[in-house]
Image: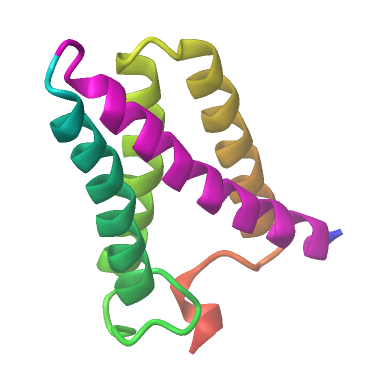
Amino acid sequence: MTGVQLTLRLLLELASLAALAVGGYGLWHGGPVVVRVLIALALPVAAAVLWGRYAAPRRPVRDSAVAWYGVQLLIWGGSVALLAITGHSGWAIWLGALMVVNTVWLRLAGEWSPEIER
């Protein structure tokens, strides 16, 4: 069952990148389309870089549990918040709920902490 939860975790990580793009595009309603597209591209790219550096299983920075937790909270919380702010509250609720359930499940199974990846 843990394998299913880890697969769901990966899908939620990808969904958070999509949510950042959708939320980023809708953040400046009425703004120039070029700027909105740039925001929609920049947010997921920045999130992917941060995740790869501080939260991914093969991350180069392994000495900071604060960064590990903080980056995940920033990216997942930011994606849910952006969806809610930009009028996609139903999607935000579902995504946030799935993220919480998945994280609690993996934590109880001992599969979610920075120490297990050392």
Residue depicted at 64% across the width and 68% down the height: 111
Residue ranking furthest to the right: 1
Residue 30 occupies which quadrant of the picture? Answer: top left
Q: Position of residue 49 (x, y in %)?
A: 29, 67
80 lies left or right of 91: left
Q: Position of residue 33 (x, y in %)?
A: 20, 25
Residue situated in front as seen by the camera: 66 or 9: 9
4 lies left or right of 29: right
* SS assignment for the magenta stretch, majority: helix
Residue 31 occupies which quadrant of the picture? Answer: top left
Q: Position of residue 101 (x, y in %)?
A: 64, 39
Residue situated in front as seen by the camera: 19 or 74: 19
Q: Image height check: is 9 above or below 84?
A: below
Residue situated in front as seen by the camera: 87 or 80: 87
Residue 25 covered by magenta stretch: yes
102 lies left or right of 75: right
Residue depicted at 31% across the width and 37% down the height: 78
Q: Position of residue 84 (x, y in %)?
A: 38, 17
State the extent of the magenta-drawn residues as a range. 2-30
Residue 45 covered by magenta stretch: no
Residue depicted at 39% across the width and 69% down the height: 55
For the rendered model, the colour scheme is rainbow
104 lies left or right of 60: right
- Asked whether the viewer can see residue 70, the reply is no
Residue situated in front as seen by the camera: 86 or 80: 86
Q: Image height check: is 114 above or below 83?
A: below
Q: Image height check: is 112 above or below 74?
A: below
Q: Quadrant of the N terminus?
A: bottom right
- Asked whether the viewer can see residue 105, the reply is yes
Q: Image height check: is 13 above or below 30?
A: below
